[in-house]
Amino acid sequence: MLMHPIQQMIEIKVNFFSYFKDLTGCEATRIDLEEGATLEQAMEMVREKFPKLESMKRSTLVAVGLEYVATDHVLSEGEEISLFPPVQGG
């Protein structure tokens, strides 16, 4: 019988800024991911949970902690993702 290792889960907080708060109906949420998950996998989960964000996929600014990182960034327990709408000029 093949035994599969039990994947550890990590909890990530996702913060919404500006009108993303209106689109999601909240300022923040928490998601559970398998250890080793990437930022892109987290974003897929966030868009599944909040489908209204799907149309903003290409223009959303995404930071982990205080820095913008690549979508292949591997997330760690306790990290925070922040989502910002595109910068608007006036």
Image (cartoon, helix red, strand yellow):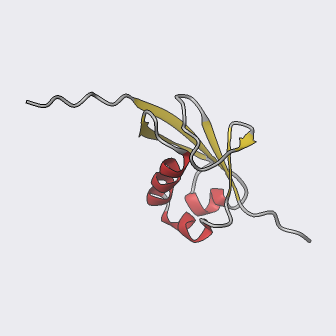
* Image quarter hosting the N terminus: top left
Say left or right for 4 vs 75. left
Q: Give the number of callouts.
A: 0
User: Residue shown at 71%/61% (left/top)?
Assistant: 85
Image height check: is 62 above or below 36?
below
Vertically, is 50 above or below 78?
Answer: below
Residue at 67% over, 61% down: 60
The quarter holding residue 32 reads: top left
Residue 90 point in image, percent of width and height:
92, 71
Q: Which of 11 and 73 is in front in this view?
A: 73
Q: In which quarter of the image is residue 14?
A: top right
Residue at the farthest front position: 2
Indicate the position of residue 27 as horizontal and vertical percent values.
63, 48
Q: Measuring 69% from the left and 62% from the top, which residue is drawn there?
A: 19
Depth order, front residue of 80/4: 4
Q: Position of residue 63 (x, y in %)?
A: 69, 46
